[in-house]
Image: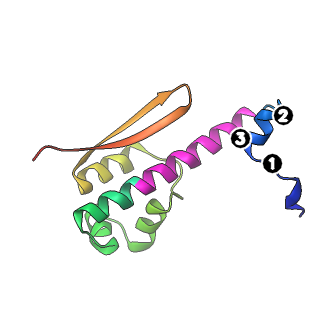
Amino acid sequence: MNHSRWRTARERALRGEVEAPRIAAQREQIRLAMDLGQLVYDRRKVLGLSEEDLAGLLGTDADEFEAIEVGSVLPLTSELLSRIAAALRVDVDVRWNADGAVVTFDDRAA
């Protein structure tokens, strides 16, 4: 396979190429999962939890937890977001705007 012909989404947009809606939706899901993974990692570090500690709080094993942190859990479900919110003691906020979905955590007041 010749990867030199691959173009980034930005390069395609600059050329006026239109991405298929299905591909654009998949790309958005991947970006959202990666953003969530980074938020989980950052919050875990703030709380001083190990991966094993947080996996236990989420009711999952270490492999499934690692998939969450690296952003490879697709699709994101409300059940998963609810478990993450409870384990990390945060409110999870997902908003859609003109640029796509944005996921954020809000610390719960003690």
The x, y position of residue 84, in whole percent, is 32, 53
Q: Which mark is residue 7?
A: 1
Whole-Å distance between the Cαs marked 3 and 2?
17 Å
Kindly identify which residue carries mark 2.
15
Few, some or many C-alpha atoms within 10 Å of disc 1 (few <14, some 14-19, many ≥20)? few
On the question of residue 19 being in view, the answer is no
- The spot of residue 68 in percent (x, y) is 45, 60
* Secondary structure predominantly adopted by residues drawn in magenta: helix
Q: Which residue is mark 3?
A: 23
Q: Position of residue 49 (x, y in %)?
A: 26, 69
Q: Secondary structure at mark 3?
A: helix
- C-alpha gap between disc 1 and disc 2: 10 Å
Give the residues drawn in magenta, as a range. Answer: 19-38
Residue lying farthest top?
98
Q: Is residue 47 magenta?
A: no
49 lies above or below 105: below
Q: Are marks 1 and 3 in contact (CB under 8 Å)?
A: no
Kind of residue at disc 1: Arg
Q: How packed is label 3: few (under 14 Cα within 10 Å), some, or many (20 or more)?
A: few
Q: Dividing the picture into quarters, in which one does residue 19 lie?
A: top right
